[in-house]
Image (cartoon, coloured by chain):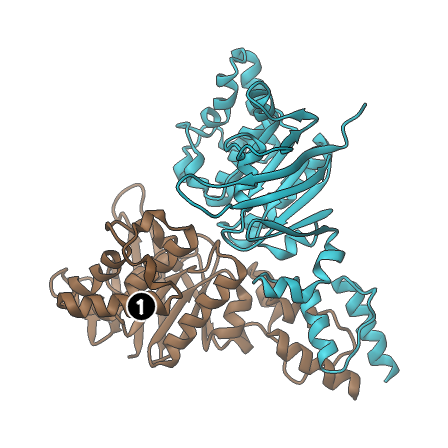
Chain colours: A brown, B cyan
Amino acid sequence: MSIKFEKVNYIYSPGTSMEKKGLDNVSFELTENSFVALVGHTGSGKSTLMQHFNALLKPSSGTIDIAGYHITNQTGNKNLKKLRKQVSLVFQFPEAQLFENTVLEDIEFGPKNFGATENEAKSKALKWLKRVGLDETIANKSPFELSGGQMRRVAIAGVMANEPAILCLDEPAAGLDPKSRKEMMKLFVDYQKAGHTVILVTHNMDDAAEYASDVLVMEHGKLIKHDVPKRIFADRNWLEKHYLDEPTSSLFAAGLTDFNFKDHPLTIDQLVAGIKENVRG
Amino acid sequence: MPVDNAVEFKNILFTYPDTEKAVLDKISFKIKKGSWTSLIGHNGSGKSTISKLINGLLLPDSIADSKINVLGMELNQETVWKIREKVGIVFQNPDNQFVGATVGDDVAFGLENRAVPRNRMVKIVRNVLADVGMLDYINAEPANLSGGQKQRVAIAGILAVEPEIIILDESTSMLDPSGREQILKIIRRLKKEKNLTVISITHDIDEANMADDVIVLNDGKILAQGTPTIIFDKTEMLEKIGLDIPFVYKLIDKLNKVGISVPQNIKTKDELKQYLCQLNLKK
């Protein structure tokens, strides 16, 4: 399911003294089944952009084509249910949004809301409870008795149980321990491989370099670059100018003077291979 | 006699109410005064429980021959208030630790509790906000600050009561990279200026690599304590318990595996770069 933004502007509180441009003439196209990293500093417009994916915010001008919908400033709030079933957003610290009495009920809430029967909702909830790495034995516990990391997983299971075609997550692994981080990233990579589009809002350039097929870079509400990681991270002067971090391996490689890398390494495995080629001649 | 240890745990057992398994299983350790000590371990390994035991927010199970010493004082009913004045904790979520309507009010809270006279209070508030680079925001509403700015205000609130020990309980894990770097820089400077002991509970392995001392916790037990060099050499142990290792150790490990052997004394990125460049020239 492709996504197309054309000249999208978004203005917060138009006509007031608080007026502020959230998105500034943003255009891009993403192909179906891609893994996208959306990067940029705090306040660059990443979250504003994310909220346009399922029309929580609608453009002040410009158009968005997503999941068979054509969204403009004329789009009403009616009939958006199907869009929201196909495009799901997971906000930062989603564990703050848990509310049901039990873990299972919390995960079932989404599917039921989109019309699943009791049985369907239950089987989906159990399936995703396991997929996010939680044990079935906690299904009947209160979500508020769980650890922070477990709560995060429950919240994410609740969104993934709707099996959206496009899954968009804002820093889903922030604050998790390294092992949980890795498991979480694997979950999203597997989801993308199973034929869905995953959009990851992140500050972690190592993740962007390792997993993304497309990187979108936002700054002051503008999309300043859309490219593959290899080309995004190839231009260190450009990165520096925009205060963006380089992936750790890329930075290390840059410090190896007199080394000749065929492809500038972005991940640790590429770095090791590149070093080997150099020192072995 | 001067006290060498900021914190000393001896044979500490802790079980949360209504649970059977102990979170801390008879642990003992010492944290040197004036050191930066990182506590690492996966979620649920007992790290945060330790920080709450240090200032008496939690009390250990009473078993024989067990005690907690903080700055030379044995923690008990009488000393707990004095100890709390000396130990400040910066928690993980910047939004959960605001009480004041403005930045200045928030920092003043701890001083009001201690009935510090107003003219002195005003001075202290300004001083500590300047210390963390937030003086310009003294009248700002906390809600309008970024996560990193909120954590700086939280740190100022703690500095105001002049602690000797600062505990960072995953204080940077919710911040973006530049916010994180700023906080660590401020703490490093303050540690030097005010001769603080810093105990940092963290998942950021590159931060732990810069500590003086690292304590590794797993399932309520202390697996190892030592300098980062000693700890991060135990690659297998750390991976087994689900912890990450610093980038440079990971890289050395992978290079060794593809037949590029790196001498054992190389421990930093710069040393490794230098070594690899020499290797490249010699080929």
Out of A103 and A90, give the one closest to the viewer.
Answer: A103
The chain ID associated with circle 1 is A
Out of B123 and B246, give the one closest to the viewer.
Answer: B246
Q: Is residue A77 visible?
A: yes
Residue for point 40% across, 71% down: A188
Q: Is residue A71 visible?
A: no
- Residue B240, image x and y in percent? 60, 65
Residue for point 47% across, 67% down: A183
* Rendered position, B27 above or below B142: below
- Residue A161, image x and y in percent? 27, 67
Dot 1 amino acid type: Trp
Element on which disc 1 rests: helix
Residue B134 found in image quarter: top right
Residue A270 found in image quarter: bottom right
- Residue B266, image x and y in percent? 81, 65
Residue for point 25% across, 73% down: A66
Residue for point 32% across, 65% down: A129
- Residue B51, image x and y in percent? 56, 38
Q: Is residue B208 left or right of residue A201?
A: right
The mark total stands at 1
Q: Is residue A219 left or right of residue B160?
A: left
Residue at image mark 1? A128
* Rendered position, B238 above or below B54: below
* Rendered position, A23 above or below B174: below
* Rendered position, B275 above or below A194: above
Q: State which quarter of the image contains the N terminus of chain A.
A: bottom left
Neighbours of disc 1 within 10 Å: few (<14), some (14-19), many (20+): many
Residue at the right extreme of this rendering: B282
Out of A189 and A64, give the one closest to the viewer.
Answer: A189
Q: Is residue A129 left or right of residue B254?
A: left
Out of B77 and A271, give the one closest to the viewer.
Answer: B77
